[in-house]
Amino acid sequence: MPRSEPIGTAGAPAAASLAAQFHATRALSEALAAPLSDADASLQSMEDASPAKWHLAHTTWFWETFLLRDHVPGYRLHCEDWPFLFNSYYEAEGPRISRFARGMLSRPALAEVLEWRAVVNAAMIPLLDDPALAGLIALGVAHEQQHIELLLTDIKHALFCNPLGPAMWAGSAPAAQAAAAPLGWHAHPGGIALVGHDGAGFTFDNEGPRHRVWLEPFALADRLVTNGEWDAFIADGGYANPRLWLADGWAWVQREGITAPLYWRENQHFTHQGWQTRDPNAPATHISHFEADAYATWAGARLPTEFEWEVMAAAEDPAAGNQLDGAAPPLPKGGAGMFGDAWQFTRSAYLPYPGFRVAAGAVGEYNGKFMSGQVVLRGASCATVRGHSRSTYRNFFYPHQRWQFTGLRLAKDIAG
Ligand SMILES: [Fe+2]
């Protein structure tokens, strides 16, 4: 996805459940595209985002390339020249169109891509019960789940760019919630902690190896920062005070004329249901790392490190909270728990763990080569397929990016 596309292949779930996961994930991708016209699905609003049709095709290319082509003797590609269109960034898989040319692909039409998906789905069936392929299939499912989230966030940005503010789904957002609970803190005494994935079950390679870190005493907020709290930051001149900002962040604010989170307009925000009244009690989202850091400074706190976040989330159910269950508009709602609503910024640079080795072959390009200049986010968002994330999961984005459902949980130092 983490442009976001972590990848790893250690371990694998049981084959029977994998087949069910495969079919459910493929069906969800298509259900999300159902409200879109061919024109909607072909829009590319910025280089960071891809057309919905491209996501539907690229995930199919992934299955056709790494499973069918590589593991079915005599398999013939559905269309020989489509890999050039739908390879994302795998140098080992040859040349590809430039990232910002994905919006020029008026052909193949959406219907042709959906037809290709059906062909690949049928061809995959004999492979789904092969234990030797379970790790690769689990990777393909996780990969497509990541693209489901990207499909949702990319089409949201594309529709936002239309002055009419079209809705992907009709209807109004739910009524405003009860007042958010006063911010509380969970303290941790610090000490040596074990972090990272132990390799049992599916994991992306960037989550391991498991290793020890040292933590100083700290406290972590018991909920995310809300829209109403962000309004107070704005009202207090948060976007006009250079003392609150990292130098790169302040330069970004000045250069881009940033005065609020992405998608904000007066007391409204843009959603998959078009322009809606913003709920002051819901978590603030669509903020950049720069904004999260400035807010934390203004609030007299700081961002957590990724390891502080992980030790506090280790005992929680990663499938809890407001995450994606089907083809419905994702919207942050707020609540307790470490997972759901929004990916949470950390102050940790996205770097390899001690002992990290890039996997052999093309899938080795999934994660490691992106470990430069990005920051780690933890948790899961309202657009994350439920079951996809876990406490060791590392999402990552560049510090100015904010079209994902990104939010903020405060941390602070405490006396030991
Ligand atoms: Fe991908």
Image: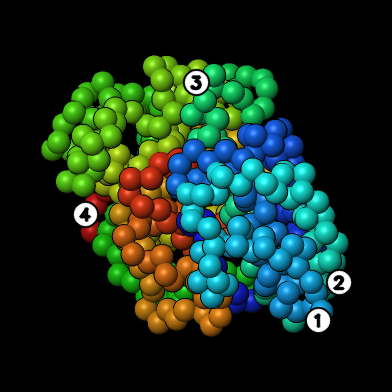
| Percent position of residue 33, x then y | 70, 40
Q: How is the image coloured?
A: rainbow
Q: Is mark 3 within 8 Å of ligand 1?
A: no
Front position among marks 2 and 4: 2
The answer to whether the residue labelled 3 contacts the one labelled 4, judged by CB atoms less than 8 Å apart, is: no
Element at badge 4? loop
Q: Which residue is mark 1?
A: 73
413 relative to 17 in the view: left or right: left
Q: Nearer the viewer, residue 129 or 305?
A: 129
Mark 2 is on which residue type?
Answer: Pro
Nearest to N terminus: mark 2 or mark 4: 2
Q: Residue at x 71, y 78 (%)?
A: 70
Q: Which residue is mark 2?
A: 126
Q: Within the displayed image, which quadrant is ligand 1 positioned in?
A: bottom right
Mark 3 is on which residue type?
Answer: Pro
Distance of mark 3 from mark 1, alpha carbons?
50 Å
Mark 4 is on which residue type?
Answer: Ala
| Percent position of residue 180, x then y | 45, 28
